[in-house]
Image (cartoon, helix red, strand yellow):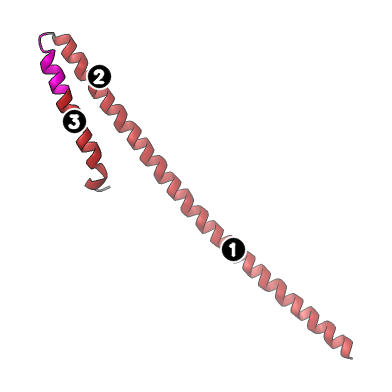
Amino acid sequence: MELQDFITEIILTIILVISTLVLVLRFWQDAIVAVTAVIVVLSLWCLFIIIDLKIRELNENILMRERNLRINMDEVAKQISEKNDHTLQQMNELISEISRRMYR
């Protein structure tokens, strides 16, 4: 994937880091609150990354299945066309044979 695909995530990560630093600097007197705030923000960030990766994976699977469906539909259309042509050829042969018998 290209860098352009991740621009929104990079911007959101920068905002997340800045907001975490502001939160930690505000609560710096109480170390437990600061550490807890950092852990919460990092866990939220990881959760968002995991959700984003799952959505991308689902999107890729959908695109792959769509391609497979198109290929299968093309093959079925070709088979139906070939069977139709074969049936028409047989019908024409039968009609010509019946025509020959009638004129005899």
Give the label on residue 94, or none. none
Q: Position of residue 95 (x, y in %)?
A: 80, 80
* Disc 1 packing (10 Å; few <14; some 14–19; many ≥20): few
Give the label on residue 15, or none. 3
Q: Quote the CA–CA distance across marks 2 and 3.
A: 15 Å
* Disc 2 packing (10 Å; few <14; some 14–19; many ≥20): few
Query: Residue under circle 1?
Result: 77
Q: Amino acid at mark 2?
A: Val
Query: Residue under circle 2?
Result: 40
Q: Find numbered disc 2 in the image and state the secondary structure of the residue it sits on.
A: helix
Q: Amino acid at mark 3?
A: Ile
Instruction: Report the front residue among 20 and 60.
Output: 20
Q: Amino acid at mark 1?
A: Ala
* Disc 3 packing (10 Å; few <14; some 14–19; many ≥20): few
- Asked if marks 1 and 3 touch (Cβ < 8 Å), the reply is no
Residue 78, by quadrant, is bottom right
